[in-house]
Amino acid sequence: MKRVLVTGAGGFIGRHCVPRLIRRGFEVHAVSRRGAPIAASDAHWHACDLLDAEQLAQLMAQVRPEGLIHFAWETTPAEYRTSVENLRWLRASIALVEEFARCGGRRLVVAGTCAEYDWRCGFLSEGITALRPATLYGVCKNRLREAVEALAEAAALSWAWGRIFHLYGPCEAPERLVASVIRELLAGGRARCTSGLQVRDYLAVQDAAEAFAVLFDSDVKGPINVASGQPVSVRGLIRMIGRQLDLVDRIEFGALSCGPEEPPLLVADVRRLCDEVGWRPKWSRAEGLAEAIRWWRESAQVRPG
């Protein structure tokens, strides 16, 4: 199996995953609504709106991939959890998998989310924790997982489902937590934050991309948590950024309220990822944050002070 189609290839995880698949010897066909990004890798790029059934059918007939990694979805910060676009992406994603099977596809890996879980449990394990999504985003992802499982069984597809936890790193959306704190401090402002007492599982996006590449290049099936397995308080993570910039005094904890939907603890059980897939993070948090800071320093997206 050599030819793999990657949707959302210009997105946060996809753009990091494409070159890693190429290094593994795959012929990568990368899909983005706008085609190849400025810093495109040696992939075959396709401009396609996956929400358009005709464009989707044409793409699959043209590429006829043996493998598929599906990242594309609605991810606009502050909107994606409740956006009705989730429903459109659910329908389009089911159609994508159907077309993939019809064209002779063999190995399928889809990006899921920790939002599928019952967040009241805190420590989230694939084989133990109940699935109880509390947002439209989580509900639609979980419905897609159910459809993928059924379709894969009917079409004899090998499938895996990577449940993503909290990520940070180069090319992150500016409004997301780590990126927003870095940008504010670099611009000379003050980073206004919640108390930061909530505990999360943060992973560098480079590691997440590598995890998906390794998962795809394996025969491991079913849901797999894609995370570090290492808890950190949001306050501790933000203070690490402040210390690296020597600007801890410009961080205002407690300036923002924490929403009622934010649980005190969300940490992944990564035993399947480590023991079955055989993957472990390569980037320490200090290294990952330093790389994110370097990227934002060099980016024109840092807003002026």
Image (spheres, rainbow, N blue to C red):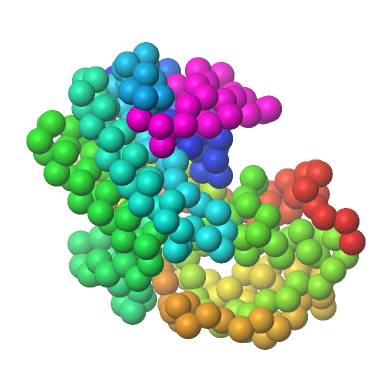
Between 64 and 241, the residue placed more toward the observer is 64
Between 8 and 290, the residue placed more toward the observer is 8
Between 293 and 104, the residue placed more toward the observer is 104
Q: Residue furthest top?
A: 62
Between 57 and 293, the residue placed more toward the observer is 57
Above or below, 217 against 304 in this view is above
Q: Quadrant of the N terminus?
A: top left
Going by the image, does 258 lie left or right of 271?
Answer: right
Q: Residue at x 50, y 22 (%)?
A: 46
Q: Residue at x 11, y 38 (%)?
A: 153
Q: Quadrant of the C terminus?
A: bottom right
The percent position of residue 209, horizontal first and vertical second, equals: 48, 42
Residue 152 occupies quadrant: top left
Residue span colored magenta:
29-53
Above or below, 263 against 46 in this view is below
Above or below, 65 against 289 in this view is above
- The mark tally for this picture is 0
Q: Residue at x 78, y 44 (%)?
A: 299
